[in-house]
Image: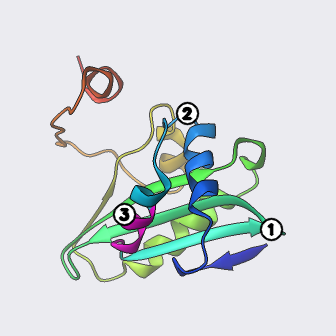
Amino acid sequence: MEKRYSTQNVDWKAIAALFAEVGWGERQPEQIRAAFEKSSHVIFLYEGAELVAFGRTMDDGCYYAMLVDVLVKPFCQGRGLGREIVDHLREQLAGYKFVTLTAAVGKDDFYLKLGWSRQKSAMIWPMSEQQREAHVLK
């Protein structure tokens, strides 16, 4: 398993394809590149030349940090790659006061098994009805 920690020499079309493959919708490669280049920490996992998983963080440098875009190719799920990504990113955020994530719908149990906890209070400003349906408690 090859690991890359840089946004240099990344096939952004492959990243866009993986977003689509896991059901997170269509994203433009150049917009993805711009977002990842602004991220604090990134990790890409490859089997041979094939991208199979990735994740990234966003933070303010000392207080607040968030794991975002943790994705594993569907046929590779259940092999510990997601755990490896989350553990690596969490290690990069040691010392922060508050580390959060928003789990993809249906993935809560994965994060609970890794030791994450549900928050008593978390809010979202829905940007669409689809987002409201997926993430807002009724």
Residue in front for this viewpoint, 135 or 52: 52
What crowding class fits label 3: few (fewer than 14 Cα within 10 Å), some (14-19), or many (20 or more)? few
Tell me the distance, in whole angstroms, between the alpha carbons under discs 3 and 1: 23 Å
What crowding class fits label 1: few (fewer than 14 Cα within 10 Å), some (14-19), or many (20 or more)? few
Q: Which residue is mark 1?
A: 49
Image point (44%, 59%), residue name = 30
Residue 22, percent from left and from top: 60, 38
Q: Is residue 104 above or below residue 68?
A: above
Predominant secondary structure, magenta span: helix
Image point (19%, 43%), residue name = 122
Rendering quarter of residue 20: top right
Image point (30%, 83%), residue name = 95
Image point (33%, 44%), residue name = 118
What crowding class fits label 2: few (fewer than 14 Cα within 10 Å), some (14-19), or many (20 or more)? few
**Element at badge 2?**
loop
Check residue 85 for magenta coloring. no
Which residue occupies the extreme top position in the image? 138
Q: Which residue is mark 2?
A: 23
Relative to 11, 48 lies left or right: right
Three-letter amino acid code at the position of disc 3: Ala
Label located before the other in sequence (2 or 1):
2
Three-letter amino acid code at the position of disc 1: Ala
In the drawing, what numbered circle is on residue 12?
Answer: none
> Which of the two marks, 2 or 1, is nearer to us in this view?
1
**Element at badge 3?**
helix
Give the extent of the magenta segment.
Answer: 33-39
